[in-house]
C-alpha cells in the first residue's frame, strides 16, 4: 500500500480533521513505525459512537500500517466520578466488558483485535516518577486560560466553583500522548482543544518527548466526527450542538451495542430528522456511517409507500442521498425505515453476540453494576 492509499484510509469518513495532513504525509514518508492511541473513559454501556465510529477509525489506521492502541482511562474516569467513583469497579469493567466488547466490535469492523494494544492508565503511572514530572512540566508550560479553554461548555461556565479535578484532567490527556509515544493522537472532535494543546507543548516537553527518527516532533491530531444525540430538537445553539453527542448516561440519545434489533428500530423511528435538513441530522449521519462508509456492491434502497407517490429510490453514494433529501424527494419516515434496516443488518453479529455469546454474560454483569452505581 503506497503513501496516498494509507492517507486515504486514515483521512476518510468518519475523520473530520487532521492536524496536519502534510505532517502526517511526512511522518509516513519516513518509513518509521508510527504509533496511535485513543483513550476512553469507563463510564457505562458502550454505544455506537464509541463502538462503531471511534473503532472504525482505529481499524482504518490498523489497515494503514499504524500500530494502534486503546487507553482504558481508569484514573480519568475516577476523577470524573464515573461508576460511583469506585476505582476498583472501574478497572473491573474496563478489563472485562470494555476490552471484550471492543475486541468484538473491531472484529466485526474487519480489524484484527489481537493486534490492538490495551493500556490501563493507572499502569502507566504506577511507580513512575517521570510521568509525574511530566505532569508538573506541563503545568509549568501552561496557564489557567489554556486549561479552561480545553474544558466543556459546562466547565467553562462554572467560574471559580469548578472542581479542581476538572482542571487536572486536560493535563492527564496531554501527558497520555507522550507517555504512550503516540505519533497520532486520536479522539472525537470534542477532544480537539486538549490535543491542540499537546501539539503546542510537544517541542518543549522534557519528559517522554515524542520522537521520530531521533528527532523531537509534534503528535498528529486526528479527530473523528460525532453522531449527534438522537433526541436533539434543532433549537440548540451552535456551541451546544457541538457537544450534543450520544451519551451513555442518557439512553434515549444513543444506540447501544447491546440493544436489540427492535430497540434500535424504535430509537431511529423516534430520532430527530427534520425534512430537507441534513446538518446535525442523526439519521443522515447513521446512513453515512452504516451505508456509505465502505464501497457498496449494491445500492442503498428507500421504499416509498404507493399512496404517497411511491416508488423505489436507489443511491450509490452518500452525496446522492444528501441531494435527494435536501430537495425534499425523501420523506423522513421513509429514510428512517431504510436506515433502521441497514443499522440492524450491520450490527447483527454484535446483537447476536450480546444475546447468545460471551457478550450475554458481560451485559448481565454490566446490568447489575449499572443498577448500583446510578
Image (cartoon, rainbow, N blue to C red):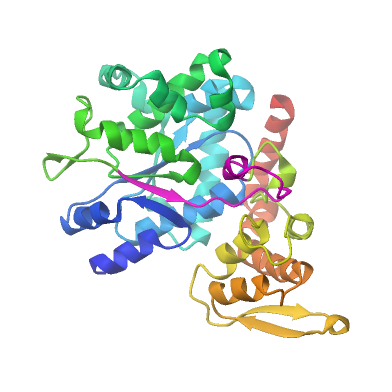
Report the quarter where the N terminus lies: bottom left
Q: Is residue 238 visible?
A: yes
| Main secondary structure along the magenta-highlighted residues | loop
- Identified at 56% across, 62% down, the residue is 289
Q: Is residue 240 magenta?
A: yes
Residue 115 relative to residue 343: left or right: left
Residue 278 lies in what quarter of the image?
bottom right
Residue 177 lies in what quarter of the image?
top left
192 is higher (above) or lower (below) than 13:
above
Q: Is residue 267 magenta?
A: no
- Identified at 69% across, 25% down, the residue is 373
- Identified at 35% across, 49% down, the residue is 68
Image x and y of residue 361, in percent: 66, 43
Report the quarter where the C terminus lies: top right
Residue bounds of the magenta highlight: 220-245
Residue 211 relative to residue 5: left or right: left
Image x and y of residue 246, in percent: 63, 45
- Identified at 33% across, 22% down, the residue is 142
Image x and y of residue 127, in percent: 31, 17
Image x and y of residue 288, in percent: 57, 65
Of residues 66 and 210, the one nearer the viewer is 210
Name the outermost residue toward the left: 214
Amino acid at each position: 500500500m503506497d503513501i496516498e492509499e494509507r492517507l486515504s484510509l486514515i483521512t476518510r469518513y468518519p475523520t473530520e480533521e487532521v492536524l496536519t495532513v502534510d505532517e502526517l504525509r511526512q511522518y509516513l514518508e519516513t518509513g518509521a513505525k508510527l504509533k496511535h492511541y485513543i483513550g476512553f473513559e469507563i463510564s457505562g454501556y458502550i454505544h455506537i459512537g464509541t463502538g462503531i465510529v471511534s473503532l472504525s477509525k482505529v481499524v482504518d489506521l490498523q489497515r494503514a500500517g499504524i500500530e494502534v492502541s486503546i487507553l482504558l482511562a481508569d484514573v480519568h474516569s475516577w476523577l470524573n466520578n464515573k461508576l460511583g467513583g469506585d476505582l476498583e469497579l472501574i478497572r473491573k469493567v474496563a478489563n472485562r466488558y470494555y476490552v471484550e466488547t471492543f475486541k468484538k466490535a473491531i472484529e466485526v469492523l474487519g480489524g484484527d483485535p489481537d493486534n490492538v494494544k490495551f493500556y490501563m492508565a493507572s499502569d502507566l503511572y504506577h511507580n513512575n516518577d517521570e510521568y509525574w514530572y511530566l505532569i508538573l512540566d506541563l503545568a509549568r508550560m501552561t496557564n489557567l486560560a489554556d486549561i479552561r479553554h480545553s474544558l466543556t461548555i459546562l466547565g467553562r461556565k462554572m467560574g471559580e466553583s469548578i472542581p479542581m479535578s476538572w482542571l487536572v484532567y486536560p493535563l492527564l490527556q496531554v501527558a497520555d500522548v507522550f507517555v504512550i509515544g503516540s505519533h497520532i493522537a486520536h479522539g472525537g472532535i470534542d477532544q480537539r482543544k486538549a490535543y491542540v494543546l499537546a501539539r503546542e507543548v510537544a517541542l518543549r516537553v522534557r519528559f517522554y518527548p515524542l520522537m521520530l527518527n531521533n528527532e523531537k516532533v509534534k503528535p498528529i491530531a486526528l479527530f473523528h466526527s460525532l453522531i449527534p444525540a438522537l433526541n436533539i430538537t434543532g433549537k440548540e445553539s451552535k456551541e451546544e450542538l457541538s457537544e450534543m453527542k450520544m451519551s451513555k448516561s442518557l439512553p434515549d440519545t444513543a444506540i447501544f451495542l447491546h440493544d436489540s434489533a427492535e430497540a434500535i428500530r424504535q430509537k431511529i423511528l423516534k430520532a430527530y430528522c427534520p425534512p430537507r435538513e441534513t446538518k446535525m441530522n442523526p439519521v443522515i449521519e447513521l446512513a453515512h456511517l452504516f451505508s456509505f462508509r465502505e464501497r457498496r456492491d449494491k445500492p442503498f434502497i428507500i421504499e416509498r409507500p404507493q399512496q404517497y407517490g411511491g416508488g423505489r429510490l436507489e443511491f450509490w453514494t452518500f452525496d446522492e442521498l444528501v441531494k435527494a433529501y435536501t430537495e425534499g424527494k425523501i420523506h423522513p419516515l421513509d429514510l428512517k425505515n431504510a436506515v433502521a434496516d441497514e443499522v440492524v443488518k450491520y450490527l447483527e453479529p454484535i446483537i447476536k453476540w450480546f444475546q447468545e455469546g460471551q457478550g450475554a454474560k458481560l451485559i448481565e454483569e454490566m446490568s447489575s453494576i449499572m443498577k448500583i452505581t446510578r
